[in-house]
Structures are given as structure tokens and as C-alpha cells.
Amino acid sequence: MRSKTLLAGLLTASLALSLTAGCVTINVPGGTPEPTQTTPPATTTPTTPTTPTTPTTPTTTTTPTTPTTPTTPTTPTTTTIPTVGPIVTVPPSVTVKPTFPIIQPPLANTDWILEAMGPSGDLEPALATTDVTLSFGDDGKLGGNGGCNGYSGDYESALSGDLSVSDITSTLMLCTKPGVAAQEHAFLDALDEAESYKVVSGKLQITAEDTVLVLRPA
């Protein structure tokens, strides 16, 4: 037993590992070295190179943006500045009252007696010794007595007051009363030149070129 222990110690002390051609030689004191089958070195499986890890790109969560509705361009407002013209002075307003034509009564079927005649503003009363008469028919005819002679003629009148007399004829009697012939002549001349008429206070006024005849109802 002791010899086995000694042998084991020697083996331990003298163990030399010789790596020659893949073999391990064990030298045992006092004996012939025996080749010992050497366990071939373990084959190291080459390590598959680790594929480098692709760096992870951080994921950015993008919130979808609602597309902005394009703003309709505002049409620029053009302000027209009125051109200031010459200053016109407006006179104070004058209230104009509407005028209506004065309607004269129709002359047809009326009868009159001469009251006065002469220039406007200087009338003379008719002679009291005789009557000068004037009648208007409804057929455009007129007639009467000039104080001595009878007469007749044509007339046209309008309600506006226009009056025209034409074609006066008279008898040729001799007038012996003073002033009657002159008054008759002046009356017929004014009547032949009549331009207008109007009725004022119930009296007929006939205006000629330079003479006014005033007649009252017969």
C-alpha cells in the first residue's frame, strides 16, 4: 500500500506534458515510457460571427396632420374716390306754386250792353242816350246794335280767354244824335281787334290792342 502511494507521488512529481505531434508522454521513473493515446485536442467549432445588430431606428409616431384648406385669396376692394368738381352754389330753394289756367265761362248764348270803354286805366262811360249791345250765338256768329246801326260778324273763343272777331259788317244809317256815331265807330273798331276776354264780377271785359270794352249782362 505504501509502495502504491509512493508511486503515485512520483508520478505526480515527474509528470511532464510534452505536446509533440499531438501526443502526451508520461515518464514514469524506473520504467519504460509507454506512449499514451493522447486525446486529440478538442476541436473548437469556429464561432459564427455574430451578425452585427442593425441599430434600431427609433420609431417616430407621426400624427397625421389634417390638410389645411387653402384660403381663398381675398379680392382687394377698390375704393373709388369721387372726383371733387367745381363747387356749385345752390341758391335757396324757391317754392313754386302750381298755376292752373283760369277757365273763362263760354260766350255762346250770352247778351251784353256796353257800360264803358277806352284805354286801360282811363275808361269813359258809354252814352246814356243809346244802348250799344253785343250778343254771342252758339254757331260762332255775333251781332248787335252799335247805337245807331246794326252789325254782325264771326268770332272764335276759348275757355282760356282767347277771343278773335272777324268779318264785321254794319248798316249805313245816318246817326243824328251827338256822339253816337263816334262811339259806334270806336266800339266796332275795338271789337274787330279783340284779343282776349274775361268775366270779372259778372261783367265782360274785352281787351283789344289799346282799348278795353266793359259790358254788363243785358
Image (tube, rainbow, N blue to C red):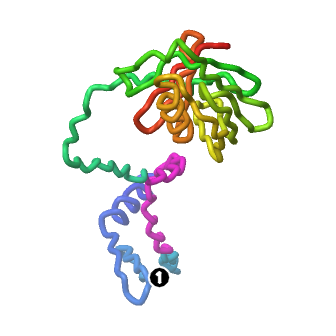
Of helix, strand and loop, which one carries label 1? strand
In terms of secondary structure, what is the magenta stretch mainly?
Answer: loop
When asked about the image quadrant of residue 6, the answer is bottom left
Assess whether residue 202 is covered by the magenta stretch: no
The percent position of residue 116, horizontal first and vertical second, equals: 48, 18
- For the point 40% across and 76% down, the residue is 26
The percent position of residue 13, horizontal first and vertical second, equals: 30, 64
Residue picked out by circle 1: 34
Task: Give the position of the C terminus as an image quadrant.
Answer: top right
13 or 21, which is in the foreground?
Answer: 21
Residue 164 seen in this snapshot: yes
- Highlighted range, magenta: 47-73
**Callout 1 amino acid:** Glu
Residue furthest out toward the top: 201
- For the point 47% across and 82% down, the residue is 34
The percent position of residue 146, horizontal first and vertical second, equals: 60, 29
108 or 54, which is in the foreground?
Answer: 108
- For the point 68% across and 41% down, the residue is 153
